[in-house]
C-alpha cells in the first residue's frame, strides 16, 4: 500500500508542478498583449564593429492603431561610456527610407547604470517613436549602425527592436 501512495504522491506533484508552470506561462504571455514585435540580435563577442549593420524586418498590417517603437540595448557593466550613438535607417515597403541619429543614455553622470540589471548585463529600452501610425502596410526594415568613434565598440551584447500598441487593448 505504501508504494501505491508514493506513486500517487509523485503523480499529484507532477500535475501540480505542470499546473503552476502553465499558469505562470499564461500570466507572462497575457501581461504583454500590446507587443506587436520584439526581437534581439546578438553582437558577436560583445564587440560591435561599425561596419556591422543590425537589421530587423517587420511585417506591418495595422495602419490605424498608434504604435510605440523602441530601441533595445543590452550592455555589460564594463561598457566604457555612458551613452551610445546609433544611425538608424527605416526602410518603408515602397522603398523610401529615412535616417536618424539617436543617442541612447546608458548611465547617469555618476556612472550608475540605467535600465534593469541582472548580474553584469544591463537591459535598456529607448523610445524612438511615440504614437506612430505606420502609413503603409507591408515589410518595414529597421537598420542600426553604431555611431561611436571607436570600432569595434566593446561590451554591447545585444541590440533589439520592440513595437507595441500605444493604446491599451
Image (spheres, rainbow, N blue to C red):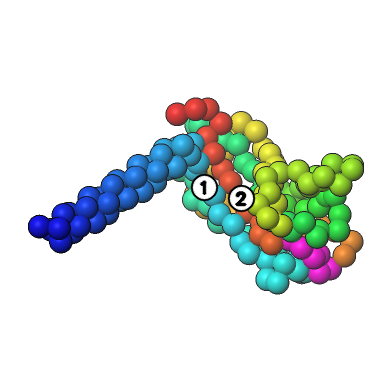
Q: Name the outermost residue toward the bottom.
A: 45
Is 111 placed above or below 156 here?
above
Q: Name the outermost residue toward the top.
A: 168
- Work out whether residue 137 or residue 78 is closer to the camera in this orientation and state it: 78
Quadrant position of residue 163: top right
Q: Position of residue 122 (x, y in %)?
A: 70, 51
SS under mark 1: strand
- Residue range (magenta): 151-156
Residue at horizontal 34 percent and vertical 45 percent from the top: 20
The label on residue 161 is 2
Quadrant position of residue 150: bottom right
| C-beta proximity under 8 Å, tags 2 and 1 | yes
Q: Is residue 9 left or right of residue 142?
A: left
Q: Which residue is mark 1?
A: 37
Other-residue count near label 1 (Cα within 10 Å), few / some / many at <14 / 14–19 / ≥20? some
Q: Position of residue 155 (x, y in %)?
A: 76, 63
Is 101 placed above or below 40 here?
above
SS under mark 2: strand
Which numbered disc, 2 or 1, marks the residue that appears first in the sequence? 1
| Residue 26 can be seen in this image | yes
Residue at horizontal 55 percent and vertical 54 percent from the top: 39
Other-residue count near label 2 (Cα within 10 Å), few / some / many at <14 / 14–19 / ≥20? many
Quadrant location of the N terminus in the rendered image = bottom left
Q: Position of residue 61 (x, y in %)?
A: 46, 43
Residue at horizontal 54 percent and vertical 49 percent from the top: 38
Q: Name the outermost residue toward the left.
A: 1
Q: Is residue 155 magenta?
A: yes
- Work out whether residue 3 or residue 128 is closer to the camera in this orientation and state it: 3
| Residue 94 can be seen in this image | no
Quadrant location of the C terminus in the rendered image = top left
Amino acid at each position: 500500500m505504501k508504494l501505491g501512495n508514493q506513486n500517487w504522491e509523485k503523480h499529484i506533484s507532477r500535475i501540480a508542478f505542470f499546473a503552476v508552470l502553465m499558469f505562470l506561462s499564461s500570466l507572462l504571455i497575457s501581461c504583454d498583449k500590446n507587443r506587436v514585435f520584439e526581437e534581439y540580435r546578438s553582437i558577436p563577442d560583445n564587440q560591435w564593429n561599425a561596419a556591422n549593420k543590425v537589421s530587423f524586418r517587420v511585417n506591418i498590417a495595422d495602419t490605424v492603431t498608434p504604435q510605440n517603437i523602441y530601441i533595445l540595448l543590452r550592455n555589460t557593466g564594463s561598457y566604457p561610456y555612458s551613452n551610445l550613438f546609433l544611425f538608424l535607417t527605416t526602410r518603408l515597403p515602397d522603398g523610401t527610407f529615412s535616417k536618424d541619429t539617436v543617442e541612447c543614455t546608458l548611465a547617469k553622470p555618476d556612472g550608475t547604470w540605467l535600465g534593469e540589471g541582472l548580474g553584469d548585463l544591463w537591459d535598456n529600452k529607448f523610445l524612438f517613436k511615440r504614437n506612430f501610425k505606420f502609413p503603409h502596410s507591408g515589410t518595414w526594415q529597421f537598420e542600426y549602425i553604431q555611431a561611436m568613434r571607436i570600432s569595434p565598440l566593446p561590451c554591447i551584447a545585444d541590440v533589439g527592436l520592440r513595437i507595441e500598441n500605444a493604446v491599451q487593448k
